Image (spheres, rainbow, N blue to C red):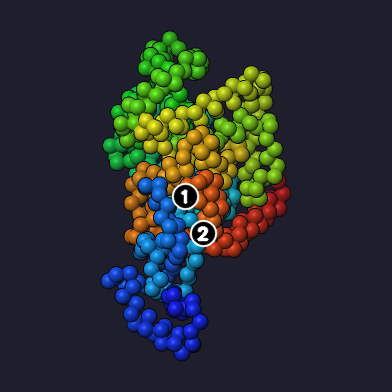
């Protein structure tokens, strides 16, 4: 059915005149918006578009979508013709690109259905792309990624590291454990064959030269490389070796101490890991850190701060999570994994508890200096079944609130949660609202440049051209809650 959006439609005119006009409009569909054909599947008119690159709001704008692509973003044109009948009045609405969560884990070999039911929940929270920072379900995540890309499954676009590189006998489940350069090469062969989107490396048992070599070799194969920071290496030498992003800003605190000196003493055996950590804590200087940030700001390094997890643990005792909305979608089996971190903190003294809070505050205080130094920040939640109360989807919004509370302005935060993710992954089809890009769009009821909390005030989501109204999103959430209940009941856990 054809629907014509034209000022005359909105004035009382005779039915006959309407019919004539409608035929004319069809014939003359090519005249609107310059010389280009202007027939669209979906049109949002009279809206305020947020240009995340400049951080500017552009009122009286129109966004047109045809198929899976954005075909027009610009001033309102009342003569525009819509083919397939979806015209959205954007009056009072704010249009942003789909949101990216740059650090999630879709993990748990016994949580496959539990993770699957969450995909629509991500979309309902405006999150249209996630970066899975490795999982014990690596191969399953790759299948999900491909199914979503092929339109066989509803969910956010997934970028994934598959499985991560670690040393022998790592604490984490499902790692690709390496002890030699030969094993490194064969694991990278494996990841390459699996067509993972980036390489993740962590430091539980992988140390020193082989860690550095892993960065270099992954980089040489054309991968972006995201890592934790092992004790025996300095952040600058890792960046020089091709490190693309540091996961977790907690590691950045090392730059506030005599980082190179401490690393040298760890390497020579003069300091244990625990002693090094204590020294980093005791000798932190913001001034020293800022100087290091300034140097890193000249490089391509990105940092995914993931503050929320530390915050949740630091304030665990005084927070009642029993009414948290996201629990509706998390199976008992999923949240049972939360206990692990709670148990680890059981014997914390009052001083330990205070130290957690102080450390969380100090990491949070690094956001503005890192940003001002020119370091690219990526918004990521680290949501995962083993990350206690860091909820899928909602966790990213809470992370953005922390960014705002830390003093970053909403325009910058919005860029960190959209364009920066796309730029990092080299995804030129997403991250901002421009003609030719993938139609991943969120329609908000309030202005995200006033407060980033507005990104939770969602009127509709468009994913790859598919339109989800508020009612449809609510149905998706309801279905996810039902699915969770069914899984719980079937398992009788
Ligand atoms: Zn993680």
Depth check, front residue: 148 or 110: 148
Query: Where is residue 176 drawn, in percent x and y?
Result: 43, 36
**Res. 125 in view:** no
- Badge 2: few (under 14), some or many (20 or more) residues near its Cα, within 10 Å? some
Q: CA distance from mark 2 to mark 1?
A: 20 Å
Q: Residue at x 55, y 46 (%)?
A: 453
- Badge 1: few (under 14), some or many (20 or more) residues near its Cα, within 10 Å? many
Depth check, front residue: 374 or 493: 374
User: What residue is shown with label 1?
Assistant: 99
Instruction: Point out the residue furthest to the top here.
Output: 270
User: What residue is shown with label 2?
Assistant: 92
**Res. 266 in view:** yes
Q: Residue at x 41, y 31 (%)?
A: 370
Q: Is mark 1 within 8 Å of ligand 1?
A: no
Vertical comparison of 492 with 462: above or below: above
Label 2: which secondary element: loop
Q: Residue at x 31, y 32 (%)?
A: 299
Q: Is residue 294 left or right of residue 408?
A: left
Query: Where is residue 53 drawn, in percent x and y?
Result: 37, 47
Depth check, front residue: 328 or 378: 378
Viewer-nearest of labels 2 and 1?
A: 2
Vertical comparison of 393 with 288: above or below: below
Q: Is residue 281 left or right of residue 217?
A: right
Query: Where is residue 109 drawn, in percent x and y?
Result: 55, 44
Q: Residue at x 68, y 51 (%)?
A: 488
Vertical comparison of 43 with 454: above or below: below
Query: Where is residue 192 drawn, in percent x and y?
Result: 34, 44
């Amino acid at each position: 059915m054809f629907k014509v959006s034209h000022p005359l439609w909105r004035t009382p005119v005779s039915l006959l005149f309407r019919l004539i006009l409608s035929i004319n409009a069809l014939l003359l569909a090519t005249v609107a918006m310059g010389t280009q054909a202007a027939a669209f599947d979906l049109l949002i008119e009279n809206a305020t578009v947020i240009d995340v690159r400049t951080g500017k709001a552009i009122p009286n704008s129109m966004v047109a979508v045809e198929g899976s692509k954005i075909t027009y973003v610009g001033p309102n044109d009342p003569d525009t013709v819509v083919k397939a009948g979806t015209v959205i009045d954007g009056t009072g609405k704010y249009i942003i690109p789909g949101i990216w969560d740059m650090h999630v884990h879709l993990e748990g070999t016994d949580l496959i259905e539990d993770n699957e039911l969450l995909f629509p929940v991500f979309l309902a929270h405006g999150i249209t792309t996630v970066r899975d920072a490795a999982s014990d379900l690596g191969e399953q995540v790759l299948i999900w990624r491909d199914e979503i890309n092929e339109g066989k499954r509803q969910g956010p676009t997934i970028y994934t590291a598959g499985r991560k590189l670690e040393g022998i006998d790592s604490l984490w489940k499902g790692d690709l454990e390496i002890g030699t350069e030969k094993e490194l090469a064969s694991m990278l062969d494996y990841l390459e064959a699996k067509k993972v989107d980036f390489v993740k490396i962590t430091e539980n048992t992988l140390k020193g030269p082989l860690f550095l070599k892993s960065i270099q070799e992954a980089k040489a194969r054309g991968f972006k490389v995201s890592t934790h920071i092992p004790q025996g290496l300095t952040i600058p030498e890792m960046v020089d070796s091709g490190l693309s992003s540091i996961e977790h800003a907690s590691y950045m605190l090392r730059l506030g101490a005599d980082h190179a000196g401490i690393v040298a003493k760890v390497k020579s055996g003069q300091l244990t890991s625990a002693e090094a950590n204590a020294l980093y804590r005791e000798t932190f200087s913001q001034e020293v850190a800022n100087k290091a940030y300034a140097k890193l700001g000249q490089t391509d390094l990105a940092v995914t701060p993931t503050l929320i997890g530390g915050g949740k643990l630091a304030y665990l005792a005084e927070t009642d999570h029993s009414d948290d909305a996201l629990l509706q979608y998390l199976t008992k089996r999923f949240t049972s994994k939360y206990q692990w971190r709670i148990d680890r903190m059981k014997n914390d003294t009052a001083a330990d508890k205070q130290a957690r809070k102080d450390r969380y505050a100090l990491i949070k205080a690094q956001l503005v200096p890192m940003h001002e130094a020119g370091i690219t920040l990526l918004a990521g939640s680290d949501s995962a079944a083993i990350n206690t109360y860091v909820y899928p989807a909602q966790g990213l919004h809470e992370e953005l609130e922390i960014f705002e509370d830390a003093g970053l302005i909403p325009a910058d935060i919005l860029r960190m949660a959209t364009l920066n993710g796309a730029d990092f992954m080299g995804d030129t089809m997403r991250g901002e609202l421009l003609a030719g890009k993938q139609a991943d769009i969120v329609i908000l009821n309030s202005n995200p440049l006033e407060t980033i909390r507005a990104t939770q005030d969602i009127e509709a989501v468009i994913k790859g051209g598919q339109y989800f109204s508020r009612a449809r999103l609510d149905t998706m959430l309801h279905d996810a809650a039902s699915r969770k209940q069914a899984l719980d009941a079937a398992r009788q856990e």
